Image (cartoon, coloured by chain):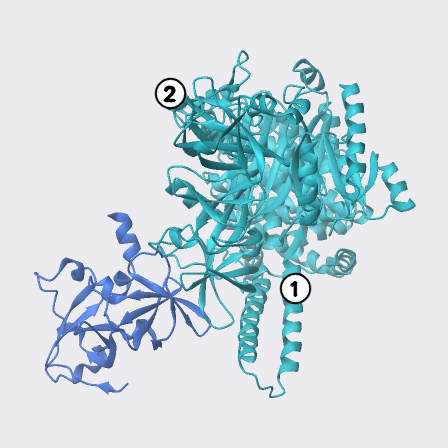
Chain colours: A blue, B cyan
Amino acid sequence: MKLVDSTPSGNVKAASRQMEFVTVTVAGQLLGLPISRVHDVFVVSEMTTVPLAPGEIAGLLNLRGRVVTAVSLRRRLGLGDIPDAGRRMAVGLENQGEAYGLLVDDVGEVLKLNPDEMQPNPVHMDRGWVGLSQGVHQLRDQLLIVLDVDAVLAFETEREAA
Amino acid sequence: MDDLLLEFLTETNEHLETVDVEMVRFEQDPNNEAILSNIFRLVHTIKGTCGFLGLPRLEALAHAAETLMGKFRDGMAVTTPAVSLILSTLDRIKEILGELERQGAEPEGSDGDLIELLDRMASQEPPAPEAAPPPKAPQSTGAAIHQVLERELKPGEVSLDELERAFQEAPGPEKSTTAGTLTYQVLERPLKPGEVSLDDLERAFREAPGPAPLVIDKPVEKVSSEKPAAPASPPAIQQKKNADSPETGESGEGISGKVQTIRVNVDTLEHLMTMVSELVLTRNQLLEIARRSSEDHGYKVPLQRLSQVTAELQDGVMKTRMQPIGNAWQKLPRVVRDLSNELSKKIDLVMQGADTELDRQVLEVIKDPLTHMVRNSADHGIENPADRKAAGKSEKGTIRLNAYHEGGSITIEIADDGKGLNFAAIRKKAGERGIASDAELERMSDAQVAKFIFHPGFSTAAKVTSVSGRGVGMDVVKTNIELIGGTVDIRSEQGRGTTFTIKIPLTLAIVAALIVSSKDQRFAIPQIAVSELVRVSPTSEHSIERINGTPILRLRDRLLPIVPLSKVMGLSGNEDANHGFVVVTQVAHQRFGILVDGVFHTEEIVVKPMSTKLRHIQLFSGNTILGDGAVVLIIDPNGLARMVGSESDRNEFQSDASAEQAVVAADEMTSLLVFRGGSESLKAVPLSLVTRLEEIEASTIEWSSGRPVVQYRGRLMPLVSCDEELTIKREGMQSLLVFSDGDVSMGLAVAEIVDIVEDKLDIELLAERSDLVGSAVVRGRTTEIVNVAHYLPMVLETWSRKERKGGSERSLLLVDSSTFFRDMLVPVLKASGYRVQTASTAQEAVRLLSNGLHIDVVVTDLELSGHSGFALVASLRADPHHSTTPVIGLTVKPDPQQIALARKLHISEIVSKIDRRGLLSALAELNGTLEEAA
């Protein structure tokens, strides 16, 4: 994974204020996860589905002897599964002492972005997405949504409230 | 010194240490109820233990202190003199404990002085006026000390307390720096590991009687002369140092006496356990690799060794955590004995399942609650002999403790046959205490009302005894049990007794599990819940049949409800699975079969907790990683039972034990087969009595001399109509309920089979009709419960003979570890008129009996696997309910030794295992004597 400095305005001076994001794609959309929250990135080999589990949970994984709960980012964003899932990638996260693997279509590079340049969510963005997004960064050729990791993993509480 | 006393000393010293710290905290924060109830609880425990160990001085002191603290709880102002008094009482207790440890007996002496003061303090309604404003004026503090000093024989430590307080109240010790730092040490410690240094000081004072008075004089002078503690403390510290050498020497001795065990930090054990778990996993993975590769690179032998060592290590680590529950019960017999003397009651304590092992940590937590509950049962539950006699019960009350593993948890029951909870009094008290409004109380069921006894400070006891009645206890019990994720339940019946059921999850890190598959997915079922495996297919001997779509398996003449795993998991749309394996599962008293597609092997699995996101799924208790690296879900049989029970409208689980005695046990759930006869009314019969359900072509019914018979399984089976209104059909399909007893069968013709339901069978008896047991409300509808015994004589001579006594057939418990022998003997015994219950192990038998199963005769193999049959009989004899139950022993070859032992245990007869006729004649002989007796 190489480090790409792609601050949109070329403002390299504020390096100390920059935050690093691991970028992932889901259904063509670029999303960023704060690097401080990402433990590792791994290829999903064998997954055990859990009957009766909430839809967002794709199954359980064995990550080096640790049982990891796999959460499908697609389903979390209200998107359908990929019909032909070849090599599945996952981002290892930790939330409240438990290990999660966030299933994504692909994992990209690590980007350094200036938080000051983050734009608020567009007002007409999908309601389901607004809750998971902290804001939007304008990259040169596309937009990057900054994911709120805690919100992404907070689906159960959300449902209970509903 | 006996173990009990040693344990008491260790425990009490620990408690006292906590009380010391808490007391100081409490004084600073008198409004903190949590601290107060904690202190109260600890002192209560100390008092309790002293009471049964026969330590009157300690008990009296603790009782007096507790009374005073009770006043605090009731709102009395917390004053310094009062707290000091309690602290000095604690010191006296420590002193006596010290003597006790050295001499093994309570020292001579009287504590009348302290007790009198405590009592006087407690009876003072308003707090002593002079003591009220102490903090401000150093003079009054001094005075307070003086009081305490005079009363206290060893005033040293009290003055220290006061010194501390003096320091706290004088924030800037601007005196000489050396003294300042020294006192700071003393002051800072009480907040954390504190009392240690204070203790040392006290002990120093005590153990150096010569110089002590000198020291005392000084602080008193200094304190009262307005230059508080600073100058006073150096001599005190000095004193401590002087006394240090004898102190350490002495405590060294004490330690060598005490330390046969090492206390290991739980975290250390936990960590060790985790590491072993990981090791087991890795070993499993290695074994899997070795299994797959055919080549031996010379590592297979060391691998085997590694495997073995791992297993031993695992065993060892597990053992460090497991203890039989009997350890926690050890002191109970004495508790009960002493209590019964004290209260002039006759109480029997029956303990079963003492060898049930549980996690040490869990054991520690439930120890005190158990003692509390037994004390409560003895004090509140069991009536005095006169009352018992008046109520038509035997003078001697029984407290029964029973522990057993049940699925993934341990169940402990504490039952008494006393007067039961006084629901009216609890309601009243709850209203008085404002826990619930009168209107709410009115709506509450007795079961809900019973839960109030777990409220802090709740007691309906009219008078406070030294045993219980302060309302401390049940809330502690609940708190402690819930702390480890357990539950407590109460069941109480006026005049019949109270049963507390404690369920504690067995958080064993490693369990043996059966790996099964359903729809290409593997699952683990804890081995402990699995009783047998049956392969099923439509063509084989065992095939799955359906009643209204509900799958059922006939297993040894019993109907076993089947739960297809794929269906509960929502894995399949195909509900007509007929192939596969049925995992016969026993959860509590429920038996059901889980239908799976494949069964692999048994594996030791490391239970990993479910993710919080998945914990709401009742079906799974955890997950694990198998040797091949796959993650597999662990099925929770309890959850499965609950889930299926709540999902479907009809609960298809039959209660194994209660079905046999459906009519007796009204509060047990019973599976009923509901059907319709000639009239509109619904009829029902306990499902367990029904052997089969058949639908036959009416044209196959033959009429021999006016009576309908049908050829059934190569024999003629008589048919009888279930009521007069129903005529047996001449054409079309006729539904039959088949009842079998040994080789003979009877068909009961019914109009329609309606449903299988599970409900409480609460029968209102009807005397005038012999074809009905009575009527009951089943699923909200009045249903006639059919008396099967009524029909049998109508069709069968053999049955009529044994039913002559109005259906009161004798019940027999057959204990034999061989399935073959059980299967062989059951029909024989049934045919000779016994209602037969079977058990495969001594433990199972004991459990059945302790669950209140009524048994007239026990037939047991004397060479049971695991426990010997003799041990079983011995434990029966120890139980008053079964001390005279006739027992027939089975053996392969009787030898003189066995016969002698048998005579000793009042075993009526020893019969060779293969001698059927011998067994029957022995039974007949017994029957004769029983009938004579009756």
Quarter of the image where one finds residue B876 = top right
Tag 2, which secondary structure? Answer: loop
Could you tell me residue B119's position as x and y percent?
63, 27
Parent chain of label 2 = B
Label 1 crowd bin: few (<14), some (14–19), many (20+), radius 10 Å:
few
At x 81%, y 37%, the residue is B918
Query: In front: mark 2 or mark 1?
Result: 2
Quarter of the image where one finds residue B436 = top left
Q: Nearer the viewer, residue B225 or A10?
A: A10
Tag 1, which secondary structure? Answer: helix
Disc 2 to disc 1, how far (Cα)?
Answer: 63 Å
Q: Which residue lies furthest to the top in this view?
A: B768
Label 2 crowd bin: few (<14), some (14–19), many (20+), radius 10 Å:
few
Could you tell me residue B693's position as x and y percent?
48, 36
State left or right for residue A9 relative to residue B158: left
Q: How many labels does the image show?
A: 2
Q: Which mark is residue B315?
A: 1
Q: Which of B337 and A27 is in front in this view?
A: A27
Q: Nearer the viewer, residue A156 or B288?
A: B288
Q: Which mark is residue B454?
A: none
At x 80%, y 24%, the residue is B929
Parent chain of label 1 = B
Quarter of the image where one finds residue B114 = top right
Could you tell me residue B564's position as x and y percent?
43, 51
Could you tell me residue B533's position as x and y percent?
56, 54
* Residue B796 visible at all: yes
Query: Is B17 located above or below residue A150 in the figure?
Result: above
* Residue B465 visible at all: no
Name the amino acid type tagged 2. Glu
Residue on which the image places disc 2: B680
Quadrant where the C terminus of chain B sits is top right
State left or right for residue B321 relative to residue B444: right
